[in-house]
Amino acid sequence: MKRHPQIAAEFIRDEQRTDWHNKAVYNFRLKRDAMVKTKPEWEELRQLASDIKDNVLANLDTYLEQFEAAAIANGVKVHWAEDALEHNNMVHQILQQHNIKLVVKSKSMLTEECALNEYLEEKGIEIIDTDLGERIIQMRQEPPSHIVAPAIHIKREEVGDLFREKLNTETDNNDPTYLTRAARKHLREKFLNAQAGITGVNFAVAENGGIVIVTNEGNADMGVNIPPLQIHCMGIEKIIPRWKDLSIFTRLLAPSASGQPISIYTSHYFKPKPGGEMHIVLVDNGRSAHLGRADYRSSLKCIRCSACFNTCPVYRRSGGYSYHTSIAGPIGSILMPNRSLSENADLPFASSLCGSCSDVCPVKINIHEQLYKWRQEIHEKGFTPGFKKRILKSAGKVLADPKKLNRMGKWAGKAIKVLPRFLLYNSLNAWGKNRELPIPPKQTFSEWYQQNRKHE
Amino acid sequence: MSKQNILTSIKSAKPSTSAQLPNIPPFNPLKGDLIEIFINQISANAATVILLNQEQSLLDLITQKFPTTKTILSFIPEIASTFQLSEIDHPKQLNNLDLAILPGEVAVADNGAIWVSGNAFMPRVTPYITQQLVIIINRKNIVSHMDQAYEQINLTGLGFGVFISGPSKTADIEQALVIGAQGPLGLTVIIK
């Protein structure tokens, strides 16, 4: 399996595209900053959101039962799934009971995590992603590369080519408005003929059993409100206690995600539509185990805004696919090792530990500290790649011994000056692959110190 | 069975700290004219805003603004629909609906969002499937922040409700903003 460094190396081979991707993603960060600066209560909102989520994690079982009871009283059917397979199976059973052949789905990272589309397709059910970006990547048979902007890595010319092939759009017309209208027409037809709508869930309110879904396109609501059957799939950590808590989270989510004050549609569903059926599937899939790991627990507070992606110098320049998981970026790099450490031990190293992710997180997750924590655990458990292990071991010996450190410092300074390039820049020097080694100072600090002390 | 397993697993995993649920303080109201701030916010989302003056009737305004509109589904008493809901037997038949007119319950100046209660209209797909959407909001019901809005929303018997802050939009192709994604192509807000 290819790891982050290898996939990232392939990504940055196209320098122009890397720059383009970096700028496109950073644009979200700039918009976020501009919006946040207009909100004097921003830090207060972050603290409140963080405190509410801490309370949720400490009482998750109680809130889930409260939510279930309220939802059932509203006429909703509630299901519990321990893992991805049980979730997929449940959704399939509901669809099968209604003899459903065509389903429309709006963006949901949970169903991505569970690979629901693939599961249903194998069972002969057609499932259409209806968010424009998601439809684009579904047509390209690719996973999302970003949790909010799934097609951020694709250029308009590529969308144009794709739509010419799939939707018969005009030759050479790559205008985003024209292409969006073509998709609108195509998706309308799917909405009108779908027999069920599936969505993810942004927030679920324990005290009244309501769920909240946020979109700009209106696709989730088109999908849910035309056919009689609606199914909402959510991770168990999406619960918030009170109705009024929504007033905090709805003020944080869109500004953090895209710099909008709020998304176009913040839809609240409590009861099935008249004559319809509404199902909610509560999914654990490793979350309760994750809750038990104190060092990483708080990453379950994540509201999937992607602010940490957009600010991350590594994500911006390596692309979402380099993380080889359903959730990329800094938050994915601490969530995914909780699922499987052996498969994702490379991810906590895909960071400069600059801490910008923690600064922008609307629920104040200490992302970079958890990345650092993971690195230590990965090393202790023996998952560090062999090369890195050897370097760290010798570095550890040198750094622990002042005499050795002094000798090495002097030696390295001289070596950089006198050795030919081919000896300095070779496969052993991973740091120097794309960087020049620093120009060594005339003397080391201890040499300088001793010299100047003598004169006193 | 799965429910019990999940709950048992959470009980043994959750932190022992109590982590108090914080009180949400009332936020300072926005400085300045709430109507003006609201108009600025929702206009930034490409909505058209009209302040209704006292001499003008809603009917005149709508006729003037949408002169060629054929099908109208209205849920405000001043304006009649062009057809009866009993004439359709499936929500998808609203696909060619030109204009839906809905009452807004409360609007938020801080972000331009308007709460539309699901108790005020049916079917639920109306505000999404229509080509053009008009929301009427009373100037008295414009508040500063979301906390006031959530407090004001009437939850009695509510099955569904939505905050709407503009016409549907997307920026999924190279972040180029396109107004009119899967929902309405335009939103007009009338403040009376």
Image (cartoon, grey):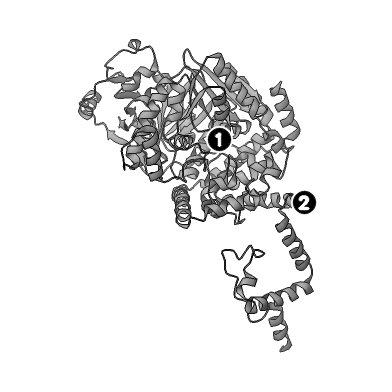
A259 sits to left or right of A419: left
* Point 63% across, 31% down: residue: A236
- Regarding mark 2 in the picture, which secondary structure is present there? helix
* Point 56% across, 29% down: residue: A118
> Residue A310 at x, y = what percent?
51, 49
Give the tally of numbered discs.
2
Query: Identity of the amino acid at label 1?
Result: Met
For label 2, the residue is A380
Q: CA distance from mark 2 to mark 1?
A: 31 Å
| Chain of the residue that carries numbered disc 1 in the rendered image | A
Query: Identity of the amino acid at label 2?
Result: Glu
Classify mark 1: residues with Cα within 10 Å, few (<14), some (14-19) or many (20+).
many
Tell me, yes or no, whether the two marked residues, 2 and 1, touch with CB atoms within 8 Å. Answer: no
* Point 71% across, 76% down: residue: A411
- Regarding mark 1 in the picture, which secondary structure is present there? helix
* Point 33% across, 10% down: residue: B87
User: Residue pushed farthest bottom?
Assistant: A455
User: Residue pushed farthest top?
Assistant: B86
> Residue A125 at x, y = what percent?
52, 22
> Residue A408 at x, y = what percent?
73, 73
Decide which of tag 2 and tag 1 comes sooner along the chain. 1
> Vertically, is A329 above or below A73?
below
Q: Nearer the viewer, residue A210 or A137?
A: A137
Classify mark 2: residues with Cα within 10 Å, few (<14), some (14-19) or many (20+).
few
Classify residue B177 by image quadrant: top left
For label 1, the residue is A109
Residue A59's tag is none
Q: Quadrant of the C terminus of chain A?
A: bottom right
Is residue A382 in view from this perspective? yes
| Chain of the residue that carries numbered disc 2 in the rendered image | A
Classify residue B7 by image quadrant: top right
